[in-house]
Amino acid sequence: MRLARPQKRPQSEGTITLINVVFLMLIFFLIAGTLTPPQDNDITMISAETGEPVQPPDTLSARANGQLYFRGQFISVETFLTGLRQTNLGGPLKVRIVADKELPALKLIDLVSKLRGLGVSSVHVITERAGQ
């Protein structure tokens, strides 16, 4: 008695297709995602009850002792504004500050006044939402 040979099934390309899809998604999220520099770890952010959560982009950090910190280095207001003017190309100067909650309010007000006096059009103090 002769038995018919079973037909060979073509191997599925499911694994390669899955790898391609995952790779394309990875590339999409790398391009579409927003990359921000790390924040200063020595800062404990001020808490706020309201506001929309926003990932702070390039921010100027003010530590509890009043020292300013930007992109991993201590910096003066004048040096920070010189760099900001070079990258801003004549547009309005906008500064975002992450202030330590232990920073005295008068020092923060003085810093904001100094920035405004040096030509900054708007200053935003970045806070974190208080626990509910």
Image (tube, rainbow, N blue to C red):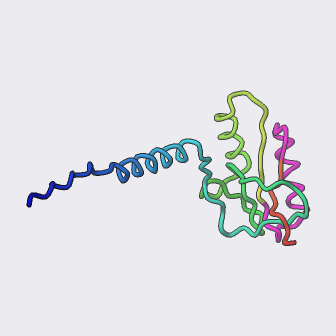
Say whether residue 68 is left or right of residue 15.
right
Q: Nearer the viewer, residue 128 or 3?
A: 3
Q: Quadrant of the N terminus?
A: bottom left
Q: Give me the residue at 90% from left, 56% from top.
A: 109
Q: Quadrant of the C terminus?
A: bottom right
Q: Give me the residue at 78% from left, 66% from top.
A: 45
Q: Is residue 35 magenta?
A: no
Q: Is residue 3 above or below residue 89?
A: below
Q: Nearer the viewer, residue 28 or 42?
A: 28
Q: Give me the residue at 75% from left, 70% from top.
A: 44
Say whether residue 66 is left or right of residue 18.
right
x and y percentages locating residue 11 in the rendered image: 28, 51
Q: Nearer the viewer, residue 100 or 28?
A: 28
Q: Nearer the viewer, residue 14 or 67?
A: 14
Q: Is residue 115 magenta?
A: yes
Quarter location, residue 47: bottom right
x and y percentages locating residue 3 in the rendered image: 13, 58
Q: Which stretch appears magenta?
A: 99-123
Q: Residue placed farthest to the left in the image?
A: 1
Q: Give me the residue at 64% from left, 58% from top.
A: 74
Q: Residue placed farthest to the front in the image?
A: 1
x and y percentages locating residue 118 in the rendered image: 81, 40
Quarter location, residue 70: bottom right
Q: Is residue 62 above or below residue 124?
A: below
Badge count: 0
Say whether residue 66 is left or right of residue 73.
right
